[in-house]
Amino acid sequence: MDSILVRSNGPLKGQIPIAGAKNACLTLMPATLLSEEPLTLTNAPRLSDIRTMTQLLQSLGSEVTSLQEGRVLAMSSHGPVNTHADYDIVRKMRASNLVLGPLLAREGIAEVSLPGGCAIGARPMDIHTDGLAQMGAEIELRDGYLHAKAAGGRLKGAVIDFPFASVGATENIMMAATLAKGTTVINNAAREPEIVDLATCLRAMGAQIEGDGTSSITVQGVERMHGATHPVVTDRIELGTYMLAPAICGGEVELLGGRINLLAAFCEKLDAAGIAVSETERGLTVARKNGDIRAVDVTTEPFPGFPTDLQAQIMALLCTAEGTSVLEEKIFENRFMHAPELIRMGARIEVHGGTATVTGVDKLRGAPVMATDLRASVSLILAGLAAEGETKVSRVYHLDRGYEHVVAKLRGVGANIERIKDA
Ligand code: EPU
């Protein structure tokens, strides 16, 4: 298994290109199932999660070809489709559940393994299945699989009020509704940029969708969808992660492809902490304002609030801020696993339930630490960039799920980081 070695170094300078969004690409790929014609995604990120989704779609009978070193995904689902999404693939990645809506819409039937919980929380699928049931699906859990069947062979439109603005449920229902009979309204829908990106792609495929980006989305079902080519939206979480590198180390870095509107709540917190963010022609530049980093309080919320996927990374910054920061995690019940690792590096953090209190220390010290999930791993790398001595982050396979070329991107701006093979 590989590890990443990070050593403390001075200010960072240069540019980091930001890839297409993992979480957008993972929901755009299953949209291929909604049409017999080809769907091509450009600006795709090169990540192991994308390879897992490729494997899943191929197991369902779709053709998925990776072109231009993975930047372009050419997909086609013109032949017969297998409606069984197997546990062996689904268990590797929760986003596999995003084939449920498209399969049900296309074939009127689907058997999708229930993904199970993961390190950050239980992550049930009741909002997805309740919504599909309102659209006329009969859904039963048997042998660890969700067996879903549309009454009469086709889903029908419904007015669905979500109890929580779930990202995945909004995506599944939106895709299912494109081919349903009649109109579907999703109230309390998620508003993330990845939802808008999916709606844009579905419209290019012939879907009739309005209201994406607001909390009420209306989908008028159509008889068939056609092919399209769609560029994947910028990865706002990769963007926010790399924005923190110059904030932690000093210097000035330009994030190519970045836009403030993808991360307004995060940018406000950086501003309050003493970090200047400005838009350039090609993206965003980030540098410290004069003076120390100041403590800020953070509460994670659905978009447009502060993203849970950047909570671990901002904690790395706040570990050396002046004062005490309170971080409240409202989306997942177990998303502070990076805290004990940061404490091993000298951070002062107390966790009580969904609240972490971080009291800034002068300096972190390098230590061997363990990555526990995707965002936790990258927060340890960020912390290591400014820590005295050497930090060795093990279990970096978590990182490969969501960050392409993390070592090359950080080395490109002067970071002292390398990937090593453990003996
Ligand atoms: N929830 C339910 N029932 C459901 C669905 C969700 O109780 O039927 C709960 C979850 O257990 C969780 C909360 O609602 O506590 C939020 O879940 P949501 O459905 O919004 O999240 P998701 O679709 O499973 C996506 C991202 C996550 C990101 C969350 C929140 C993808 C592939 N994943 O997950 O990304 O944290 O939205 O923004 O889009 C990551 O990239 O590291 C990651 C975990």
Image (cartoon, rainbow, N blue to C red):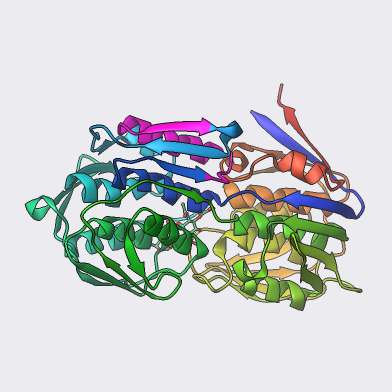
Q: Is residue 58 left or right of residue 182?
A: right
Q: Residue at x 60, y 39 (%)?
A: 400
Q: Quadrant of ligand 1?
A: bottom left
Q: Residue at x 74, y 59 (%)?
A: 282
**Relative to 21, residue 420 above or below:** above
Q: Quadrant of residue 370?
A: top right
Where is residue 401 shown, x and y percent of the image? Answer: 56, 41
**Quadrant, the N terminus:** top right
- Farthest residue to the top: give it: 423
Q: Residue at x 32, y 59 (%)?
A: 207
Q: Is residue 392 left or right of residue 82?
A: right
**Relative to 343, residue 423 above or below:** above
Q: Quadrant of residue 241?
A: bottom right
Q: Is residue 359 magenta?
A: no
Where is residue 101 shown, x and y percent of the image? Answer: 28, 52
**Relative to 152, residue 76 above or below:** above
**Relative to 338, residue 67 above or below:** above
Query: Does residue 319 show up?
Result: no
Where is residue 206 shown, x and y percent of the image? Answer: 33, 56
Query: Does residue 261 show up?
Result: yes
**Quadrant, the C terminus:** top right
Q: Is residue 126 left or right of residue 192?
A: left
The magenta-colored residue range is 42-66
